[in-house]
Amino acid sequence: MAKAGLDKSAVIAKAAEMANSEGLDAVTLKSLAEVLGIQSPSLYNYVGSLSELKKELMLYGWRQLEERMLRASAGISGYKALREMSRAFYNYARENKGVFDAALRYNKFADGEAMAVTAGLFDVVYRIFEGLNISRENSEHLIRTMRGFLEGFALLVNNDAFGNPVSVEKSFELSLDVLIEGIKTLEGK
Amino acid sequence: MAKAGLDKSAVIAKAAEMANSEGLDAVTLKSLAEVLGIQSPSLYNYVGSLSELKKELMLYGWRQLEERMLRASAGISGYKALREMSRAFYNYARENKGVFDAALRYNKFADGEAMAVTAGLFDVVYRIFEGLNISRENSEHLIRTMRGFLEGFALLVNNDAFGNPVSVEKSFELSLDVLIEGIKTLEGK
DNA sequence: CTATAATACTAATCAGATTAGGAAAATAGC
DNA sequence: GCTATTTTCCTAATCTGATTAGTATTATAG
């Protein structure tokens, strides 16, 4: 029995790949082990349990999302930054359905880990709102507005929940327009 | 073996109750059968499988949501109606975590059934936007904006994903303010 | 009062997670 | 390079919960 030369991050990465191509529920210890060429009990050398694996997938997703969003907003500010970050979020969700699904489903604040992973992101968004002359308190509310919209919209799209043929891309852009116009009324408040 | 006097809707209702009190994942055929006082294989007289049961729970949720939202907007129009409907949605999600969770997770358009259940709701929302002199095309986009926000925000709240102590109720109200101000810029377009 | 359908049950089977115990490969320290 | 330790992997076994098969009993239709 030659060793497979795996490590924890390789296992998570393969699980992410599977989740994206076949759906989060298709990731079982059994199926993952098979793809990795080992027996399922051997996976316990890398993760403590299936639910821990899913949690790792959640953190993996938030890390990648943060990275993409920070990159997207680098060097710009104001509404343009907000828009670019939002698009980066949406694009990631579209291109990584399974991981995004995990990011949402296991997005419990309880354990604090997810919070730590995205702390940098929050800082940037607060700074954007600061630049727009929006009070800290309102920024806290607005972050929730944006999170709610972005996560909900992406979830709906990924679930094919929008039944009619109207362009989803256009809906996303118009939604950002609407949100931004609304946020403008809070400048200086 | 005296018959339990069950029927499909009683089974779904009990499953809903369990989902709300113990979480959607706590609803298994085993646990549900136990609560109903029967053996788990007997459940197959009412539902075809566990996943069918979950789908029924999803439809059950959308039906209740529709009913509450229609009631909330009866007799009013415009932004007031939009606000009341949104609050009804939010309150339902807060008070029925498990069922709401099912409503989101199984909210695939694919099978059309979910669509049929909420068709009446859509009609009303289109009418509200019509009353605001917003074009049909923009209404289609705006419904998606609202759905995205409402579903995402409620999901985040239910998952305790908002880590800081700022009032969530206030965030919800301010979010509605922002959305409505944004929508106002589309009147007549 | 019978024929049929509906509702339960028990006994099995199956899939997948997890645990236990042990062997081979890699690695650390000498 | 050699031995002790750790790591990685395996097989065998257990457990939980879904699902199927086959059967008995209760309700209901006529």
Image (tube, coloured by chain):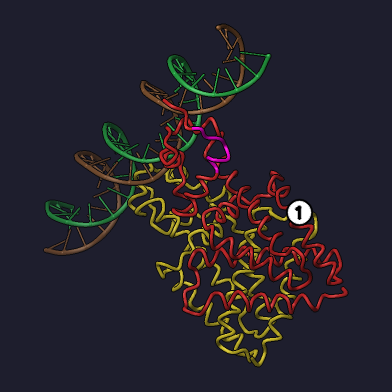
Chain colours: A yellow, B red, C brown, D green
Residue A139, quarter of the rendered image: bottom right
> Compared to C10, does B20 lie above or below?
below
Q: The disc labelled 1 sits on which kind of residue?
A: Gly
The residue depicted at 34 percent of the width and 50 percent of the height is: A44
The total of numbered circles placed on residues is: 1
Task: Determine whether A94 is above or below A178 in the image.
Answer: above
Task: Give the image location of residue D29, x and y in percent.
Answer: 65, 19
Q: Position of residue A101 (x, y in %)?
A: 55, 57
Magenta: predominant secondary structure element? helix
Where disc 1 sits, the SS reads helix
Viewer can see residue A70: no
Q: Answer with left or right where residue A41 lies relative to residue D6.
A: right
Please name the residue that numbered disc 1 is placed on: B120
Depth check, front residue: C16 or A110: A110
Provide the residue span drawn in magenta.
B5-12
Tell me the chain of label 1.
B
Describe residue B137's horizontal placement relative to residue B148 as left or right: right
